[in-house]
Amino acid sequence: MTDKFTFSLDYSSEECWGRVGRIQTRRGEIPTPVFMPVGTAGTVKTLAPDEVKTAGASIILGNTYHLMLRPGTGVLDHFGGLHRMMAWDRPMLTDSGGFQVFSLKKLNKINDEGVEFASHIDGARYWLTPEESMRIQRSIGAEIMMVFDECCPYPSDEKTARAAMERSVAWAKRCRADHPHLRNGQALFGIVQGSMYLPLRLESIKRTEEIGFEGLAVGGLSVGEPKPLMLEILDGMMPHMPKNLPRYLMGVGTPEDLFYGVERGIDMFDCVHPTRIARHATVFTTEGRISLMNARWQLSDAPIDADCSCYACRNFSRGYLRHLFKAKEILGLRMASLHNVTFMINLMNNIRQSLIEKRFIAFRDQFLGRYLDKENK
């Protein structure tokens, strides 16, 4: 492994703000734009790491909050980090734990120093600071770490959003001081906050960029606001985001979101949505989402999606997969999850190719015309 981390911008679209590039890390290259499957507790739920690789993932996510509770940094340090523990040899990104901590109902104290909260597992109390978040992420061993920030709920008034943005900037400075540029070969991304107030967002971009990070993320969107409002905020922000850094839209990742984000210049996406809905028998197809529990599939010989090359689509019918879910067999959850993750990664690969070939708008319109027309029907 080397300690280098670079972002190269290979192509900028003439049709939109979309761009094609490469992130080089100590554990390999990440082509962008990229969809990153989420492995909350050290696993992409129901899937083995080799299956996630087969799906085409170049990077996965780990969750700092959950990993600090279980297995804990003592165990992570013993195994030499999460990569070795879970047998994943490609890049990994970890969030800071901020979103989970601030969404906890048992949160009982927050001040400028950090956050005191009660574990959702056993009620034990923890004190999480920017420096502690950095320490935990170093123990996990992620190639890309995120600063500890305060995420506003939706809706929030402007005074609340301003206070959270100010605290996020202050904490970002502490994270950078504790984790200097590429310490241990691990990059650190800043996070832009400001809720739904564009002037706050633009101020956050400027002040966070000035601290100096290896990438910049957009936090605090897709937290319950209407989709048009999220896109309006992105439209106002993106011309002001630094062009030389990878741009990460945190927690956003439905098929339509990939198009909306890439069109606006986003390079990185993640979301639990594909595996979460898969565990409830809902799968992506080019004709929209379908439920495998629907009685209409009982005698269907068709694969989930004829255009998909995943193991489930190459070997199993909708009828068989419906049977697995009805019988509560674990294979059903696994195959639906494998398909949805593969679908998202393949879709992003096709989006990237459409940018290069200058046909992104046509591809977007063709895909969404079919996908959204059939959604939930």
Image: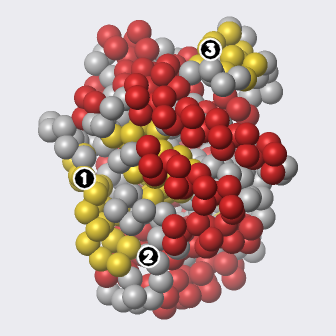
Q: Position of residue 253 (x, y in %)?
A: 56, 59
**Residue on which the image places disc 2:** 18
Quadrant into which the C terminus falls: bottom right
The residue lying at 63 percent from left, 22 percent from top is: 114
**Image height of 20 relative to 1, above or below:** below
Q: Would residue 86 be seen by someone viewing this image from the given angle?
A: no
Q: Which residue is mark 1?
A: 6
| Distance between the alpha carbons at the discs numbered 2 and 3 | 40 Å
Alpha carbons under labels 1 and 3: distance apart: 33 Å
Seen in the picture, residue 275 relative to 122 is either above or below; the reply is below
Amino acid identity at mark 1: Thr
Q: Name the N-terminal-most of marks 2 and 3.
A: 2
Residue sitting at x 60%, y 55%:
203
**Residue depicted at x 33% and y 71%:** 20
What amino acid type is highlighted by mark number 3? Trp
Provide residue 238's location: percent of width, then percent of height: 53, 68
Q: Which mark is residue 127?
A: 3
Q: Which mark is residue 93?
A: none
